[in-house]
Image (spheres, rainbow, N blue to C red):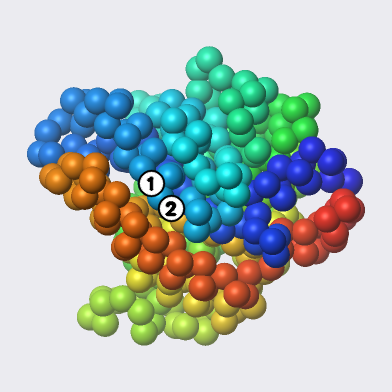
Amino acid sequence: MKISKGKQAGLQSVSDARGVIAALAIDQRDALRKLVAKAKGVDANSVAPETLEQFKEAVSRILTPQTSAILLDPEYGLPAARARAKTAGLLLAYEQTGYDKNIAGRLPRLLAGYSVSRLVASGADCIKVLLYYSAFSASAINDQKKAWVERVGAECLAADVPFFLELVAYHDEIESGTIEFARLKPEIVTRGLEEFSRPQYAVDVFKVGVPVTVAFVEGIGDAASRKAYSRDEALAHFRRADAAAGRPFIYLSEGVTATLFHQALDLAAESGSRFSGVLCGRATWSDGVGIFVKSGMSALEDWLGVAGVQNVQAINKLLGSAKPWFASRDVNSVTGIAS
């Protein structure tokens, strides 16, 4: 298929001069509210929307001069979108945060009152949705998710805007932080990339976690903990996932520490992964939440200007092995031929 001019323009807007996506994610809503509530020692429902808006705005204003783009939500992130550096593109999230725990399967939901066209009118260069996906889930559940992705892809095609699909690996019966899940994660990630690379979904870029749980790689993390894979096995999992991705993909930090994310990117580089950048969130700014709550905006700005900038720059230095989004085997050139 050919890549349209609108989609090319959107992807170029969120990429650096090399065609690598070095983006900052702060589209968290419930997760950010819980971080603030924990720092305050209050119930999450008592956190005012203005608090989230102010935090996002400061992060955007101070950190986006170091990034190629920022991912925000339209609920609390539009002031932050306006505060971003002129050189930074804008991705907007289209999904509701979280999922209904009373319904099986972690089914996705779109934001009420929004559409792809409305998000573009709000300034979005690209559209992102998050999907919990596992090939081990019941087919009836996954069929609903596949149809949902098809609908979003069709909307993005109609609006001629790039579609970023964030795939979050999970299992219905196994906690994600366990060694049991770590052993399944490579298969879940690889099969998700394989499925949603099919043309009917019209995905342009995947936002995905690395195909291993880095803390369970031999030689990484707590030496006393059990390991799910040797380093060679971990590298092989990276290569399998890379081969399954029929579209450009970027890595997300999955809420891990900056140190573990750096080690994940080291593994990606060693494996020869053709990742096209990162969309990194909490690993860069989460330590600023407590500072903001306890010491105010001025203290947060000081922290972001030093530690926050250093966090972003440290990740940017690890992108030397990243490949331009248009160098994917399915996106052969900026001018637009995809196989």
**Residue at 52% across / 84% down in the picture?**
232
**Residue 60 horizontal side relative to residue 196, left or right:** left
Residue 291 disc label:
none
Q: Is residue 43 above or below residue 280?
A: above
The answer to whether marks 1 and 2 mark residues whose Cβ atoms lie closer than 8 Å is yes
Instruction: Check the image and name the residue furthest to the top.
Output: 113
Q: Nearer the viewer, residue 184 or 87?
A: 87
Inspect this view and state whether residue 247 appears.
yes
Q: Is 241 drawn above or below residue 201 in the view shown?
A: below
Label 1, label 2: how far apart the Cα atoms are? 6 Å
Query: Residue at image x 41%, y 50%?
Result: 62
The spot of residue 166 in percent (x, y) is 55, 46
Residue with the most extreme left position? 41
Residues packed near mark 1 inside 10 Å, few (<14), some (14 to 19) or many (20 plus): many
Q: Amino acid at mark 2?
A: Leu
Q: Which mark is residue 63?
A: 2
- Kindly identify the amino acid type of the residue bearing the numbered disc 1: Val
